[in-house]
Image (spheres, helix red, strand yellow):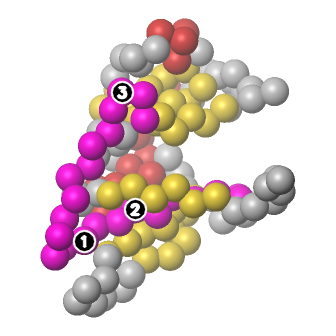
Amino acid sequence: MIASTVHVRVARPSRDLAAAERFYVDGLGLNVLWRTTERVPGKHDLVMVGPSDAGWHFELTHDPEHPLEPTPTVDDLFVLYLGKPADEEVVDRLVEAGGTRVPAHNPYWDEHGVTIADPDGYRLVLCSRTWT
């Protein structure tokens, strides 16, 4: 059995790490937990973002030598259960930081939240419900 204290990392390719960082840090309010500071041949460039005290983070990667094109689908969701309606100021910040407000593929998410595509097309849902 996997313990509830296990740290989770979600890794995603990005076309533009600076744009992804703007969206998740300036828009959503996550922290930069670590980043590459110089180009190293044969290694990926990356930035890790998340809450400083959380048990999860995103690792956003870019391989300049062999770039991958992100291929998100309409059901590749990162859902935050806020327990209240999304703050419109946060939604506006996410859009100003390069996101695009989009209708959800599953109408459940439009009924209970707001969906914003990040600069690479991956979808963030700010859900008004709680997980439990």
Q: Name the residue type under label 2.
A: Leu
Which numbered disc, 3 or 2, marks the residue that appears first in the sequence? 2
The residue range painted magenta reads 54-76
**Spatial distance from mark 1 to mark 2, Cα to Cα?**
10 Å
Q: From the top left corner, tell me how far across and down residue 37 is, in percent.
A: 36, 85
Q: Residue at x 64, y 58 (%)?
A: 8
- Residue behind mark 1: 63
| Crowd class of label 2 (few under 14; some 14 to 19; many from 20; radius 10 Å) | many
**What residue appears at the point 42 percent right and 28 percent down from the top-left corner?**
75
Q: Is residue 57 magenta?
A: yes
Circle 1 SS class: loop
Asked if the stretch drawn in magenta spans residue 7, the answer is no
Q: Are marks 1 and 3 in contact (CB under 8 Å)?
A: no
Which residue does the numbered mark 3 point to in the structure image? 74
- The residue lying at 33 percent from left, 32 percent from top is 73
Residue drawn at the location 27% of the way across and 43% of the way down:
71
Residue 62 showing in the rendered view: yes
State the residue lying farthest toward the left: 65
Q: Where does label 2 land, which residue?
A: 60
